[in-house]
Image (spheres, rainbow, N blue to C red):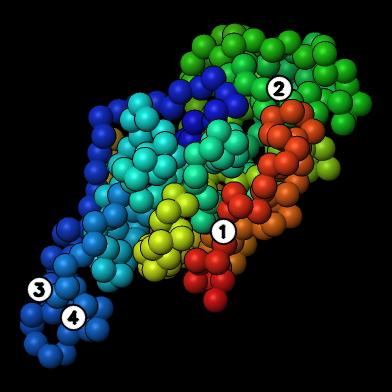
């Protein structure tokens, strides 16, 4: 799943860049358009050249990306006049590529976008992929870590990032524990099964929709989780992942943003109502994936991309404000950071 962020020391798992384009779907629509006057308006529209659009993913293909792959596989991008390349991340972050004008959109996270803007990188969040944070702290059940204050005296395997430490300590402090008695150690790798069962650490930060399902349902480990979303009285909710665009794209090419997000929203709406279709689209693009894990993860996220399937991608000013306030309180963002400029929700179909 997505890499942590600039606030963390984690590097995402890399693989050779894989591109999935809508060329095949576009070609099919062109054939339909040539079959006679009964062709659909969408098919007839494809007589015009498709505009090439690049999207940098934040990780190798997974269920966070379901809507994108469905929109491509179903021809929704082609119907919108777009030929979309979904590109796996390389050594340069998607946000940097946006700022350099070398990509049109990128999957990222709020904890990366904020420090990017602090550094002057002109990027804007235009849609939330998942409506609420699905992170949690995981531990083996025999460690008896069922609430934040139980972390006292235990080892936490992490990425040695400032935001990470602030969040963990805030959770423990808020629950009545002494955060200085949590033992922070560096995380040697992303295989949480080995890390937990070999006692490299007692707890770690995972995404429920991927590693949580893998550990519990695939590896059959007896685990406890402390869901971040259950503790928003202590720490903020935030968007992880999200879709970002460069400020130049947002201001100079708003129709591109609208058409891309409209087609993407169709993909995520289908991922919510038909998670099996999301699995098929992902498997077609990346056949090396584990279908069992994908199926379980797609089912889990189908009710979490958005609370309302017809309304995907919305962002809340309150969610952004509380996240920025937390960052400022822990000296992770300047006091004058303009959070309102970090996101724009006006391009989504639901915004109209």
Q: Secondary structure at mark 2?
A: helix
The mark that comes first in sequence, 2 or 1, is 2
- Judged by depth in the image, the label closer to the viewer, 4 or 3, is 4
Q: What is the x, y in percent for residue 313?
A: 54, 60
Left or right? Give the position of 80 relative to 212.
Answer: left
Q: Which residue is mark 4?
A: 44
Instruction: Work out whether 316 lies above or below 187.
Output: below
The mark that comes first in sequence, 2 or 4, is 4
The residues tagged by marks 1 and 3 sit, at their Cα atoms, a distance apart of: 37 Å
Quarter-of-image position of residue 182: top right
Q: Which residue is mark 3?
A: 31
Q: Which residue is mark 2?
A: 165
Q: Which one is nearer the viewer's eye here, 228 or 126?
A: 126
Q: Residue at x 41, y 61 (%)?
A: 252
Q: Which one is nearer the viewer's eye here, 246 or 35?
A: 246
Q: What is the x, y in percent for residue 3?
A: 49, 31
Quarter-of-image position of residue 148: top right
The mark that comes first in sequence, 4 or 3, is 3
Q: Which residue is mark 1?
A: 344
Instruction: Work out whether 122 lies above or below 333.
Output: below
- Judged by depth in the image, the label closer to the viewer, 1 or 3, is 1
The mark that comes first in sequence, 4 or 1, is 4
Few, some or many residues within 10 Å of mark 4 (<14, 14–19, 20+)? some
Q: Residue at x 49, y 46 (%)?
A: 123
Contact, CB < 8 Å: mark 2 with mark 1? no
Q: Residue at x 79, y 33 (%)?
A: 329
Instruction: Work out whether 181 lies above or below 112.
Output: above
């Amino acid at each position: 799943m997505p890499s942590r962020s600039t606030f963390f020391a984690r590097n995402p798992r890399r693989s050779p860049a894989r591109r999935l384009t809508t060329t095949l779907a576009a070609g099919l629509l062109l054939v339909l358009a040539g079959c006679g006057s009964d062709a659909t308006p969408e098919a007839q529209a494809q007589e015009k050249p498709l505009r090439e659009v690049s999207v940098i993913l934040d990780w190798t293909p997974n269920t966070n990306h379901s809507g994108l792959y469905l929109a491509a596989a179903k021809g929704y991008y082609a119907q919108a006049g777009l030929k979309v390349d979904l590109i796996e991340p390389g050594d340069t972050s998607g946000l940097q590529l946006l700022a350099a004008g070398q990509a049109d959109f990128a999957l990222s996270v709020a904890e990366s976008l904020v420090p990017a803007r602090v550094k002057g990188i002109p990027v804007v969040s235009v849609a939330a992929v998942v409506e609420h944070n699905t992170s949690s702290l995981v531990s083996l059940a025999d460690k008896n870590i069922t609430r934040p204050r139980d972390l006292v005296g235990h080892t936490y395997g992490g990425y040695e990032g400032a935001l990470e430490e602030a969040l963990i300590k805030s959770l423990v402090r808020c629950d009545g524990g002494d955060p200085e008695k949590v033992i922070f150690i560096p995380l040697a790798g992303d295989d949480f099964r080995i890390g937990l069962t070999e006692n490299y650490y007692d707890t770690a930060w995972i995404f429920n929709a991927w590693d949580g399902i893998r550990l519990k349902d695939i590896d059959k480990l007896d685990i406890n989780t402390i869901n971040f979303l259950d503790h928003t009285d202590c720490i903020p909710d935030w968007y992880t992942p999200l879709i970002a665009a460069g400020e130049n794209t947002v201001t100079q090419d708003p129709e591109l943003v609208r058409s891309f997000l409209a087609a993407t929203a169709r993909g995520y709406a289908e991922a919510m109502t038909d998670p099996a279709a999301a699995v098929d689209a992902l498997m077609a693009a990346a056949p090396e994936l584990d279908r069992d894990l994908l199926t379980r993860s797609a089912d889990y996220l189908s009710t979490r991309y958005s609370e309302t399937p017809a309304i995907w991608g919305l962002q809340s000013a309150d969610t952004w404000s509380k996240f920025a306030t937390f960052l400022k309180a822990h000296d992770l963002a300047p006091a004058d950071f303009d959070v309102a400029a970090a996101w724009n929700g006006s391009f989504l179909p639901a915004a109209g």
